Image (spheres, helix red, strand yellow):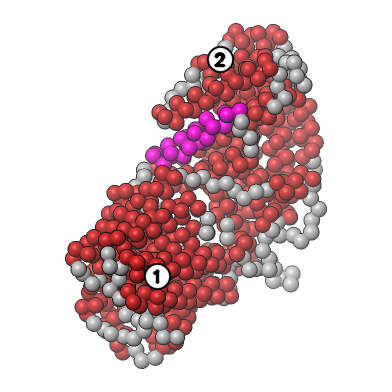
Amino acid sequence: MCRVTPALPQARWMADRYGGHDALFTLKAFLAAMLAYYIALRIGLDRPYWAIITAYIVAQPLAGAVSSKAMFRLLGTVIGAGVAIVLVPLLGNAPELLSLALALWLGLCTFVALLDRTPRAYTFLLAGYTAGIVAFPAVEAQATIFTAASLRAQEIGIGIASATLVHSLVFPRTVSARLQARIDAIMIDAERWSRDSLRVDHGDAVVTRDRRQLATDIHELHQLATHLPFESSALRLKAGVLRALETQLCLLLPLASAVEDRCRQLQRADALPPAVHVLLDDVVAWLGAPDGEGVLPEALRARARACEPDCRLPFAWHAALQLSMLDRLAELIAVHAICRELQAAMGADRIPLSPPAREAIRNARRRVLHRDYGLALRGALATSLTVLIGCLLWILSAWPAGAGAVVIASIICALFSNMDDPAPAAWKVWQGTCCAVLVAAPYAFAILPRVSDFPVLVAVLAPAFLLVGAMMVRRRLAAMAIGMILSLPGLMGLDGYYTGQFDSFANAAIAQMLGALLAVWALKMVRTVGAEQSALRLLRAGWRDLALRTDPRQQPDTVKWINTMLDRIGLLTPRLAELGSDTTAPLLDILRDTRVGMSLDDLHRFRVRAHARDDRLLDVVLGRVRQHFDRLGARGQGDPDPALVRAIDTALATIGRNGAVDDRRLALLALTSLRRNIAPDIPLSPRRDRENSAAA
């Protein structure tokens, strides 16, 4: 055992390095498709090629992802077939009304799926376009709608079951194994960024790179974690511990960025005490040591609290920055310590945890996701418009193959409507459709007529479908692969029996290409959103939320707020990077707004215990903050109102003097953070700073 175990990581590295996992996925996808096709043929289904299409669409490299996708797709298929059974007999004699009803249904399903953003969204997507798959070809044979719906549901269900079976049993790649590897890498990234944030000798470019990487890592971790409940592996990670770790990692971004900001300001003013310098060096050393060897995080936190200035008297702006930096530093140390404990407990059966780690697990909640109702509505509009235009052309031309064009167009719109600019991807789908026509023609008229049994059929189909599988694992070719798999099996003639009629092939090929082209046009006209507009929409969503958070009736929920803002960062960063845009400024803006929200929560907590005079001061501050973010939401930009800055400075000088020391400390921390994040470039009034310094 001791000789074999060290070779396993090397074997995994070799598999990743030389494409072993990609090759295995390609083979498993083909095996699942052929198994589905064989079963569909054996039980006499008339369009078994839908089983092949479904087996490829469901295919995912990770077994848990296949299971989650498959279960929701199966449920959506049943719902979509049921909708078709209801609508076709009811509106079949009024094709205009039927087209409108199906367009609205698909638009509604797309809208809900775009808001959901979890594996559950596949239920709504399948419920939408399965209704079209069943209903449109059955318009001229309404009496057989139940049979047609049953057959389509069986074909799709067989494809789902086959894909789930093969990907789960044949050399499965588990979500747990992938998550464990990503967690180890994310912890390295997180601790490196925190170290770089605390070092004087690292430039802005290094810190920004680390910050961007950590934001992307946390987003990827969440995407993988959504599939964990469907994992059948005996080594499945603990979902509760994973949620707690994800929450703690989300806390790192605003905490480390706040420490970095305060530390740089104090260094520029030469106002960082020697004891704090030593403490920062020791924290950096602790973060760089494996498992924090030799130093206890509790001792580092106690030293940070001991270095804090006295809150019982008024003090200068630099003292306020020092207090804020040391408080955030103590929290940062605590979060890193909890993350290390949770990482160790992730795959272990029994491991003792500290009270903070146990509390983090108890308080962990599912991540709150950002919802953009405007973009979801545009996606739904694009999908509904595509169906309506396609149906209109079909009805006016009386073209028998027009149903195929509408079906393919609706599927493409539903699949790609979650993208900011889906037209380029849809264009690649159209290119894949054209390639499918070229590949299918020789198969349909030269190769398949000479095939006499199933093993030979599998052998001759292997080159084409293995090529599609290989394209699916290449990011640049994935959209083309979708276009090929949506068209190739049907154009080849992989029906219940072979016909080989050229007119049927030509009509189907033209319908597929026109339908894909219609989807490209509709998505480009309605759904396209530029990177700058997407960034501004995310920022404005944060500004609207901040304006609402100033309401005195607002219940502070910092974890929920951070989760929402970190989800927005995760949405923004990869999109801008893919478009070649600079992610630095938008990322800093959202992190700044995240810290503002945390400050507002602290002010609400202080207000519960504040005296009447302090309460009036907070009314003024929160009112000015609300006006500031209302203006930002309306205009998209703008400098802070001088009246807002004066209100914060006045509150900093006088708030909490008659209350408990801990209450005053909380208020000072909140106002210092608010001042630093809303008006970082506006210096404190010299007169106010002199008054505070003299009083101190």
Q: Name the side, left or right, on which 691 lies relative to 308.
A: left
Mark 1 crowdedness (10 Å alpha carbons): few <14, some 14-19, many ≥20: many
Query: Mark 2 is on which residue type?
Result: Arg
For the point 67% across and 60% down, which residue is it?
Answer: 237
Q: Name the side, left or right, on which 523 lies relative to 542.
A: left
Q: Is residue 148 magenta?
A: no
Vertical relation: 123 (above or below) 417: below
Q: Name the side, left or right, on which 14 lies relative to 516.
A: right
For the point 36% across and 92% down, which residue is it?
Answer: 452
Q: Main secondary structure of the magenta part?
A: helix
Of the 4 image quadrants, the one containing the N terminus is bottom right
Of the 4 image quadrants, the one containing the C terminus is top right
For the point 42% across and 37% down, which residue is it?
Answer: 536
Q: Nearer the viewer, residue 574 or 620?
A: 620
For the point 64% across and 35% down, which residue is it?
Answer: 556
Q: Which residue is mark 2?
A: 646
Q: Which residue is mark 1?
A: 85
Question: Which portion, as a residue range, is magenta?
Answer: 532-552
Residue 657 visible: yes
Secondary structure under badge 1?
Answer: helix
Vertical relation: 671 (above or below) 463: above
The mark that comes first in sequence, 2 or 1, is 1
Q: Position of residue 20 (x, y in %)?
A: 52, 69
Query: Mark 1 is on which residue type?
Result: Ile
Give the foreground label among 2 and 1.
1
Which quadrant holds residue 391?
bottom left
Q: Position of residue 558 (x, y in %)?
A: 63, 37
Which quadrant holds residue 30?
bottom left
Farthest left residue in view: 397
